[in-house]
Amino acid sequence: MLLANLTTRPPRSGTLGRSALLLAALLLQACGGGYQAPLDDQSRVLERQAPPIYSTTGPSGNTAPSPTSPARTSGTSAVAAGVRVQPAPGVSVNVANEPGAIQRSTIGRAQIGGTTSTSPSNTNPTGTNSTATSPTLSSAERVANSTSVTSATSAAQMHTVVRGDTLYSIAWRYSVDYRALALANNLAPPYTIYLNQQLNVDIGNVSTTAINNVPTIPVAPAGDPAVNIGERPTAAVANRRVGSVPTRVVDDVIWQWPIEGRVLRSFSSNATSTSKGIDIGGRRGEPVYAAADGDVVYSGRGIQGQGDLIIIRHSARYLSAYSQNTNMLVTEGARIRAGDKIAEVGTDPRGSELLHFEVRVDGKPADPSQYLPPR
């Protein structure tokens, strides 16, 4: 009777509510910590809590170096390397460098230009090192760069002949021996050069023995009519220096001072290309005399920065040069005696009245004070 009453009596609503709550609690307990919140709930959890920090300790137990990130202000204390921190309840995060998780790669520090650089060795769980390669130049770019460098180098070793050039003036410009210049370009007697001819000024492969066997090279300015060889200019003879002057003999060449002024600037082996001699003070228009007997092998103003320039060959090895003149009285091919007037004092680019005087031995600048008589 009692059982019948229980089975036929409708259940109370309160009892059903308690039963539903009990079933929900049992279900949550069975799921345990594996419960994944919906994406929106996870986002709110991450916004409310500081992100967990994980070590980079791999299976081998060695801690791999990792870049240091900026400090976060989260209200939590710092965690030492190698210490694992439990994630916030309800959040699962993949740990870097663990099996099946995200792997870190090393960062290359190679310079730009096609080389490969590997950062200090970091060992990942698979036991292989990751190498980063910097950007490399393409084959076309490498060829272009190589060609430009080669072209610049080649251009620096070549000279294009212009009107009025002689082998002597070209050799003087580049501080090389004129005989070696002829050999380097396979020139044969009479050693004629032509307008727009390309001359190699690199004499590194020319031997001293070959240079010493070169015969006298005549003066033949490129593009100009034939010169009169061996004639003494009338103006030079008529205005030559008179009286006795000090002289000095070096290798059978008898030297004397070209003008009487004082030395304004001495010779320096480290001087620039326009100052490989001495500057001698004078007055504009004052006579400039030949420092020794010889032949004029250049007379012109074709070398930048030198003004009116005269070069005299005294022997196969010795040349002298006179620049910054205002009036030249001699031309190529003229035979000159020491003391002949060859020009007049002019001014340099700075406006100073002076004569720039040089001595070349085997094409190289030499200190004129070693050849001129002492004062």
Image (tube, grey):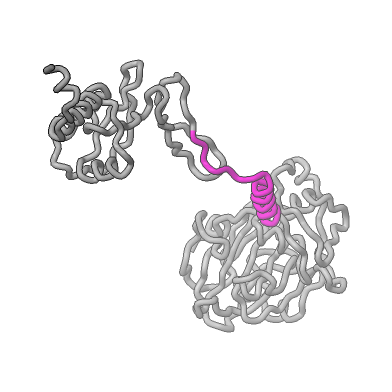
Would residue 22 appear left or right of 347 to someone viewing this image? left
Q: Is 100 located above or below residue 91 in the figure?
A: above
Q: Pick whichever, 319 or 225, lies toward us.
A: 225
Looking at the picture, tell me which residue is in the foreground, 144 or 46. 46
Magenta span main SS: helix
* Residue found 49% across the figure and 35% down from its top: 132
Front-lying residue, 175 or 48: 48
- Say left or right for 203 vs 70: right
Give the quadrant of residue 55.
top left
x, y percent for residue 316: 73, 53
- 38 magenta-colored: no
Q: Nearer the viewer, residue 205 or 244?
A: 205
Taking the magenta stretch, the answer to whether it contains residue 137 is yes
The image quadrant that residue 161 belongs to is: bottom right
> How many numbered discs, if any?
0
Q: Which residues are magenta?
A: 132-157
Residue 372, how many percent across, how many down?
Answer: 56, 60
The N terminus, quarter of image: top left
Give residue 365's quadrant in the image.
Answer: bottom right
Residue at the outermost front position? 1
272 on left or right of 151: left
Note whether residue 178 is visible.
yes
Q: Position of residue 104 (x, y in %)?
A: 41, 31
In the image as oriented, which residue stretches furthest toward the bottom? 285
Residue occupying image coordinates x 71% and y 81%:
238
Give x and y (percent) for residue 318.
Answer: 67, 56
